[in-house]
Amino acid sequence: MAILMPRKIKHRKWQKGSSKGKAYRGTTLAFGSFGLKGLERKWITARQIEAARRAIMRYLKKGGKLWIRIFPDKPVTKKGTEVPMGGGKGKVDHYVFAIKPGRIIFELDGLKEEIAKEALKKAADKLPIKTKFIKK
């Protein structure tokens, strides 16, 4: 299982930050004819992206081309169980992508519309947000 994570980042630990507004980048189809657009604001983990990708690939078998338009580069830290208060920030546990409404998550091409729709529906079931099927 090849989980997505950055090779190198400028700062090992990030602050949580706030995710306001709508996405203004990555909101239109750039590569494929069909896409899956996120409609909510949430952190999507690398594991969730990988699970959705595998669901699509399993459904498509060999046909079609898939583009993943998001990459989890935000580190999330976690302290161990039964660790007392204090002692600093925990170690990096996993990586996430902070998605905003309107962002394209996956794109597909080289397929019939109904096949692409079903494949992206299976992927949407693996994600923690509401999504919408879009086409060019």
Image (tube, rainbow, N blue to C red):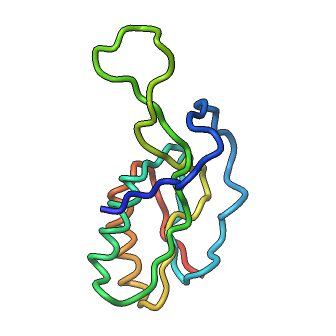
Q: Can you give x and y, in whole percent of width and height, for residue 26 in the image?
A: 66, 64
In the image, taking residue 40 as reference, residue 56 lies left or right, namely left
Vertical side of 80 occupied by 131: above or below: below
Residue 83: quarter of image: top left
Residue 62: quarter of image: bottom left
Instruction: Compare residues 13 and 71 and report the one nearer the observer.
Output: 13
Instruction: Compare residues 74 and 99 and report the one nearer the observer.
Output: 74
Measuring 40% from the left and 37% from the top, which residue is drawn there?
93
Q: Can you give x and y, in whole percent of width and height, for residue 106 in the image?
A: 49, 69
Q: Can you give x and y, in whole percent of width and height, for residue 45 in the image?
A: 43, 48
Measuring 48% from the left and 70% from the top, which residue is drawn there?
133
In the image, taking residue 96 as reference, residue 61 lies left or right, namely left
In the image, taking residue 36 as reference, residue 100 lies left or right, namely right
Q: Quadrant of the N terminus?
A: bottom left
Q: Can you give x and y, in whole percent of width and height, for residue 3 in the image?
A: 38, 57
Q: Quadrant of the C terminus?
A: bottom right
Residue projecting furthest to the right: 24
Measuring 60% from the left and 30% from the top, which residue is drawn there?
15
Vertical side of 103 occupied by 34: above or below: below
Query: So how many labels did they put on this image?
Result: 0
Vertical side of 135 occupied by 133: above or below: above
Residue projecting furthest to the top: 85
